[in-house]
Amino acid sequence: MRRCECLPRVKCACARAPLRGMIRCRWLLVHSLLLAAVGVVFYSEYATYHAAYDRWPRLEEVSSDRAVSILLVADPQIVGEQDEPSWPVGSVFRWDCDRYLRRTFEAALAHTQPDAVVFLGDLIDEGEKATDAEWARYVRRFSSIFHPHDGQFASVFLPGDNDVGGEGVNPVMPDRVKRFRDAFPVWPGTRKPIVRNRGRVFMLVRDPFGGTMDEEGDVNAQGNDQLLSVFRIVATHLPFVTHPEDEHCDVKVGAHTHISSVTWSRRKETPDSKTKHQATSDALASVVKDPDETTVFRFDTERILPRIIVPTCSYRMGMKEMGYGHLRVLLNAEQSGEGKVVEYRVLWLPGRFRQLALDAAAACILLLYACLVPKTGRYFHARRWKRNAPSSASRD
């Protein structure tokens, strides 16, 4: 009788073996969703950034006393509070935009080691219509993102139409111009150019909204025989606003259009002086984005006048292509017969919209995981309890 009672039990255990394997497979499949979500977030929030940084163009190594490095930041447009959705969507959007700017700016600083950082206007998205309390909050957020790193580099701040008005039919508001100048000094020590190895780089800031700063900062240097290189860089927010003296600068940089553009024109000597050059309209070229993102422009500014438009660095504007501009001035290159050399490249950033799409996919995977885990756990534990429960024969 005992043997007969054991036979059905053995047969029943053999019948349950495939069922236990199916339960374990289901448990592994459900938990693989968690691993998939973690992998997607790792790719979107870590791997894509470092992949973009690794593609940044490389420059030839030169000694620090022969080069001046300038990082160009265009249209960061700190997200405002009036035109954005209310809490929580607006708060999350502002937090993510600030985080993206802070993260990419830190990487650009580490890569370029700049002597100066030039902010080419439109620092605040709603600066023109912001109240004083809102403006104070925007400035604090801006400072937390683009902090000066204890004076490791000089900072130049240009106002844009979003900061002080002036776009389209909207007039420039003097009180907004004053508020901007109080919050963002143009250049600490504006009369002190960047000096390297008997060469000087002057930043002439063309402000179409409130005049020109540092106009005469380089006048005394023109007759100094001790200087081997004198570079004049004109920076402006509106690239299509011209000035007669801009033709005699070495390079002109601007922003406002949110896209990347590099144009240049040949120079020819004017009859009255061999030291002054006038740009002509021939040999004009333009590049928006190189397919492999590795283009480095190198200009001899004695023969060519480059005009650079820096792309926006914020995805707030809905642009797929974003980046920072990097300008490097080689001092005393004319000693080797190269003339006055300027190098420019764009540090392209990873597309944030693709990252957000991947983050949304990871959130959906986590939601599915959260729905399946309780059901799978209850089913697994119920089957295990039923398997281990004493049979009616043993109870008798």
Image: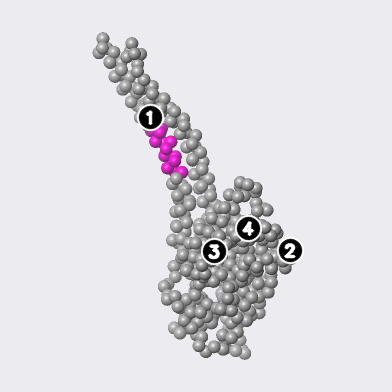
Query: Which residue is tagged 2?
Result: 170
Among numbered discs 2 and 1, the one appearing first in the sequence: 1
Among numbered discs 4 and 1, the one appearing first in the sequence: 1
Quarter where residue 139 is shown: bottom right
Mark 4–mark 1 Cα distance, whole angstroms, equals 57 Å
Mark 3–mark 1 Cα distance, whole angstroms, equals 56 Å
Residue at 64% x, 75% y: name it.
Answer: 213
Residue at 50% x, 72% y: name it.
Answer: 115
Quarter of the picture containing the C terminus is: top left
* Segment colored magenta: 25-37
- Colour option used: one colour
Q: What crowding class fits label 1: few (fewer than 14 Cα within 10 Å), some (14-19), or many (20 or more)?
A: few
Mark 3–mark 2 Cα distance, whole angstroms, equals 31 Å
* Residue 392 visible to an observer of this rendering: yes
Residue type at mark 3: give it: His
Residue at 41% x, 36% y: name it.
Answer: 29
